[in-house]
Amino acid sequence: MCSVSFKNIYPIICKLFWILIALIQVHELLFGGSELFTSVTALRPIVPCPFKTTSRLLQLPNYLTTSLTTSKVASRVSSLFVATSNEIQTNTKKSKKGNVDALEVLVIGLSHHNAPVDVREKLAIPEDQWVSAANVLTSYGSISEAVVLSTCNRFELYLSGQNPYEVIRDAIDFLINRSNGSLDQMTLRKHLFMLSAEDAIRHLLRVSSGLDSLIVGEGQILAQVKKAYEKGIEDNGKAGKVISRLLNTAVSAGKRVRSETGISKGAVSISSAAVEFTTMTLDRDCGINSGLSDASISIIGAGKMARLLLVHLQSQGVQRITIVNRSPERVNELQKEFPDLIIDFKLMDSMWDVIAVSDVVYPSTAATETIINPEPLAEVLKSRVKPSNVQFVDISVPRNVHPDCANVEGVKSYNVDDLKLVVERNTAKRRREMLE
């Protein structure tokens, strides 16, 4: 009878123990460690946990850790904001000698927070067209300065002008024209965000610091903000004194936040998230349960994203990759940079042949229209020898893979918005690491 009683009580004891563990972890996090924490947590390996890993109880210490870390970064950004705001506002008043009307800073745009990829891609501007787009913007009478920041997860216009209402009106007109009429005012207003003055400055500081990114703390956005600044101060750039000072200060703030806080610790990129997404879904989609090293992998394009893909694919044990590109020059550079990888080069004319024999395809070109469309894809797959599906992980914006390709038999198609699952998983992992 005693053994039966203990059997009934034992699960309750385990639950109480793990509740105590959670409370001690919270206490340690808020007030520092203690001998009690060391003694009690030493028993964790021998006491089974009755809670699921997704339990709110077990997530509480991680939540507090992340909140405190984010608050630390946000606090740092706020302190930088005060100095930056005063500096920028001073410069707006001096922006035009002899003109008593000050220029007001505005940011208008879309991001992964408020717009899906099918909207973002209609406004995306390639990096080599940022300056020409800024020139078009400043051709409107109300817009004095303009800089474009267009990435896979955001599209933003940094503008200055004397009348913010006229600036917004003209900027929306530019966006409608940019979308070739595929986005009307109602659709734009549904997804656009608009910030002015101090709110615009604070937003840019959050962007450059990595706080506003899909992957919090990722470093690629800082390089992109820096590139926007460099484009803006070119001979034919349109940054002007106000926007150029704002961007330059944002770059400095982004560097400072990363050096003074741990926000970038363990951060991943879109490319690494794409590779991890494939490792999570390879067995389900392609029937390959032995890992990426046994999959036939192809990359379409040979730019920056392709290079990052190679880095992360190599770390997963991949030894051979096919790259499809318009010309061999960039691929030759990648072959020299990755001597331990066997990189097969194919011209774009051979793209369909490569897809027919691939298990996983990563499209990452700067094409402004889809290059992989459902009709030719379905036709190619009729002659496919492999019985498994082909997986597309499209990390381009605008998308390289037409959305209807997902309906083609034998195809599993994903885009950058589908990578949020990986991001959430990595964020949780970073929380645990910070706690430990």
Image (spheres, helix red, strand yellow):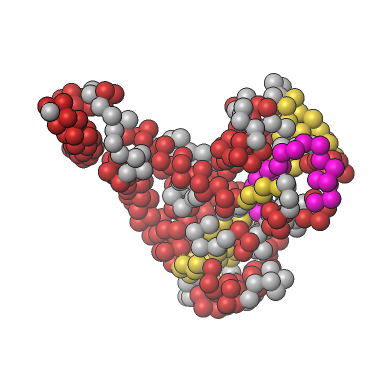
Spot occupied by residue 270 in the image (x, y as percentages of width and height): 57, 43
Furthest toward the front, the residue is: 1
Spot occupied by residue 388 in the image (x, y as percentages of width and height): 71, 39
Where residue 265 sits, quadrant-wise, is top left
Residue in view at x 63 percent, y 76 percent: 184
Q: Quadrant of the C terminus?
A: top left
Where residue 429 sits, quadrant-wise, is top left
Residue in view at x 47 percent, y 56 percent: 204
Q: Is residue 9 left or right of residue 326?
A: left
Q: Is residue 316 magenta?
A: no
Spot occupied by residue 249 in the image (x, y as percentages of width and height): 47, 51
Q: Is residue 430 left or right of residue 48?
A: right
Q: Give 193 or 116, whichever is nearer the viewer.
A: 116
**Is 200 placed above or below 381 here?**
below
Q: Give 415 or 260, whichever is nearer the viewer.
A: 415
**Is 220 placed above or below 99 here?**
above
Furthest toward the right, the residue is: 349
Q: Quadrant of the N terminus?
A: top left
Spot occupied by residue 295 in the image (x, y as percentages of width and height): 69, 31
Residue in view at x 70 percent, y 74 percent: 181
Q: Give 215 or 45, whichever is nearer the viewer.
A: 45
- The magenta span reads 378-397
